[in-house]
Amino acid sequence: MYAGTAYNTYVENSVGIESPSKLIEMLYEGVLRFNAQAKKAIKDKNIEKKIYWLNRSVAIVTELVAILDMKQDGTIAKYLEGLYNYEIQLLMEASLDGNIAKIDEVTNVFKGLLEAWRETTNVA
């Protein structure tokens, strides 16, 4: 349902993406941005916006699962697949119950992933 959505959105909005590494960085940043918007919507008691922003985060994480290369390094890819799927589960639960702690958990994971990604790819 969401496959390709995040990628297409970022490609359309970012004409000058230098590399696939930069795209991954942008996807991680998107999750962080959308999670912040979802938290604000929860605090404002705006259910429609909460669902909208959490769905956008889920779309990005779903795209991250879809683009994993299981052939190149299956161990890391399998780990990331499990991690991403767990983060999707937390986002979906937060969408149902409005639990900000679940969004914070996802945000913390993606902050760590973004930092590690920047360190290993030198795209910062």
Image (cartoon, rainbow, N blue to C red):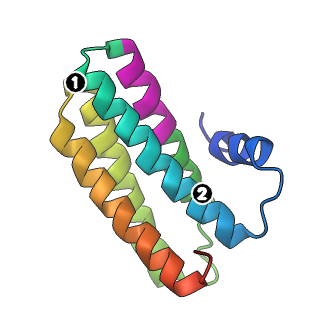
Q: Is residue 92 above or below residue 97?
A: below
Q: Nearer the viewer, residue 69 or 90?
A: 90
Secondary structure, mark 1, is helix
Magenta segment's dominant SS is: helix
Q: Tell me the kind of residue under disc 1.
A: Lys
Specify few, some or many for label 2: CA neighbours under 10 Å numbering under 14, 14-19, or 20 or more. some
Residue closer to the observer: 41 or 78: 41
Question: Is residue 110 positioned above or below 19 on the image?
Answer: above
Q: Which residue is mark 1?
A: 43
Q: Is residue 32 above or below residue 113?
A: above
Q: In this orientation, which residue lies closer to the viewer: 1 or 42?
A: 42
Q: How many marks?
A: 2
Q: CA distance from mark 1 to mark 2?
A: 26 Å
Which residue has dot 2 on it?
26
Q: Quadrant of the N terminus?
A: top right
Q: Which kind of residue does numbered mark 2 sit on?
A: Met
The quadrant of the rendering that contains the C terminus is bottom right
Q: Secondary structure at mark 2?
A: helix
Magenta stretch bounds: 48-57
Q: Seen in the image, is 14 located left or right of residue 71?
A: right
Question: Residue at (66%, 39%) from the top-left corner?
Answer: 5
In the image, 72: left or right of 54?
right
Residue 67 position in % (x across, y down) = 63, 61
Q: Is residue 30 magenta?
A: no
Q: In the image, which disc is placed on residue 76?
A: none
* Residue occupying the point 53% across, 86% down: 120
Q: Earlier in the sequence, mark 1 or mark 2?
A: 2
When asked about the image quadrant of residue 53, the answer is: top left
